[in-house]
Image: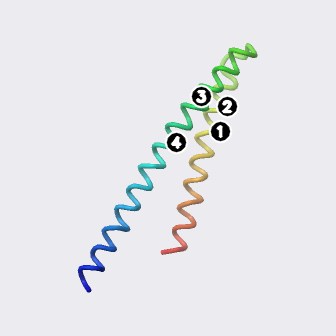
Amino acid sequence: MLMTSKAQQDRKMYSAIFMLSSWGFVIVIASFLFLYVGHKLDELLGTSPNFMFGLFFLAIFACIGRLYQDAWLKRKDV
């Protein structure tokens, strides 16, 4: 019985670590993707860094907002 409880605690700990690492990966990929799309829009429209910075910060804030929302919902489960 004690072993099952310890295994469940370890599983929860590893689940939290994997969730944070996957969110970090999502933030990096989304920020680079939006940075690239913003750069291409700036080249097309001739507006130097406007769309590039705007979409970059949009990706960062959107990903952090989703991370916060996910953490808020998981907090209620615990």
Task: Quickly name the residue at label 4.
Answer: 27
Q: State how far apart marks 2 and 3 are (Cα).
A: 9 Å
Q: Do the CB atoms of the residues marked 4 and 2 lie less than 8 Å apart? A: no
Say the numbered circle drawn on residue 35. 3
Q: Quadrant of residue 14?
A: bottom left
Q: Do the CB atoms of the residues marked 3 and 4 lie less than 8 Å apart? A: no
Give whichever of discs 4 and 2 has the lower sequence position. Answer: 4
Determine the secondary structure under disc 4.
helix
Q: Do the CB atoms of the residues marked 1 and 2 lie less than 8 Å apart? A: yes
Q: State how far apart marks 1 and 2 are (Cα).
A: 6 Å
Give whichever of discs 1 and 3 has the lower sequence position. Answer: 3
Q: Nearer the viewer, residue 50 or 9?
A: 9
Q: Residue furthest right?
A: 45
Find residue 65 and report its horizontal and vertical position in percent: 61, 51
Q: Looking at the picture, which amino acid does disc 4 mark?
A: Ile
With 50 as the anchor, is 68 left or right in this view?
left
Give whichever of discs 3 and 4 has the lower sequence position. Answer: 4
Which residue does the image show at 75% across and 16% down from the upper left? 45
User: How many residues crowd mark 2 within 10 Å: few (<14), some (14–19), many (20+)?
Assistant: few
Task: Quickly name the residue at label 1.
Answer: 58
Q: State how far apart marks 1 and 4 are (Cα).
A: 11 Å
Give whichever of discs 2 and 3 has the lower sequence position. Answer: 3
Q: Do the CB atoms of the residues marked 2 and 3 lie less than 8 Å apart? A: no
User: How many residues crowd mark 4 within 10 Å: few (<14), some (14–19), many (20+)?
Assistant: some
Which residue does the image show at 69% across and 26% down from the upper left? 51
Say the numbered circle drawn on residue 32. none
Say the numbered circle drawn on residue 54. 2
Q: Looking at the picture, which amino acid does disc 3 mark?
A: Leu
Determine the secondary structure under disc 2.
helix
The relative height of residue 36 versus residue 24 in the rendered view (above or below) is above
Determine the secondary structure under disc 3.
helix
